Image (spheres, rainbow, N blue to C red):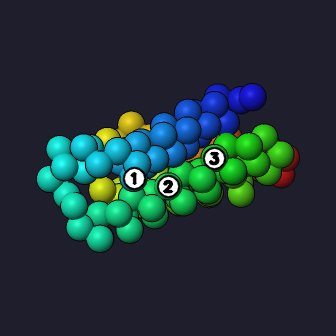
Amino acid sequence: MKVEGLLGFLGAALGIAFSLMVLTIPGISQALEEESVAFYILTSGALILSAIGLVGSFVVSHKPRMGGVMMVAAAIGGTMSVSMMFLVPIMLLALGGLIALVNYEEAETEKA
C-alpha cells in the first residue's frame, strides 16, 4: 500500500472510530456540551464521509484520481463535522488525497 493509501486508511479508520464513540457513548456528547439532534446528524455525516474516505483509500492504488478526490471530499465534508476530535482524521485524509492527486498529475505530465 502506498503512502497516500495508508494515510487515507488511518484517517478514515480514526474518523469512523471517533464517530462511533460519539454516537454510542453518551458521556462524550455531554463532555462536548452538545446534546442536540443536529449534533448527532453531523456526527452521522462524519461517519458516512469517513466511510467514503475509507473506500477512497483502497481505490487510490488502482485509480489514483478517483481515490484522491474521494479522500479530499471526505476531508472537506469532515470539516463541517462536530468537534475538534476529527482534526487528525481530517488532516490525514486531506494529506493522503492531495498526495494521490499530485502524484497522478505528475504521472500524467510525464506520459505526455
What crowding class fits label 1: few (fewer than 14 Cα within 10 Å), some (14-19), or many (20 or more)?
Answer: some
Q: Percent x, y for residue 88? A: 39, 37
Q: Secondary structure at mark 3?
A: helix
Dividing the picture into quadrants, the one containing residue 57 is top right
Please give the name of the residue rendered at 78% of the width and 40% of the height, measured from the top-left corner: 61
**Residue underneath mark 2:** 47
Mark nearer the viewer, 2 or 1? 1
Q: Earlier in the sequence, mark 1 or mark 3?
A: 1
Q: CA distance from mark 1 to mark 3?
A: 19 Å
Sequence-first tag of 2 and 3: 2
Q: Residue at x 39, y 58 (%)?
A: 43
Quadrant into which the N terminus falls:
top right
Name the amino acid type tagged 2.
Answer: Leu
The residue under the point 55% across, 43% down is 12
Residue holding disc 3: 54
Measured in 3D between alpha carbons, the distance from the residue under mark 2 to the one under mark 3, in whole angstroms, is 10 Å
User: What percent of the width, then of the height, locates residue 55?
Assistant: 69, 51
Residue 66 vertical placement versus 11 (above, below): below
Q: Which residue is mark 1?
A: 23
Q: Earlier in the sequence, mark 2 or mark 1?
A: 1
Vertical relation: 96 (above or below) 105: above
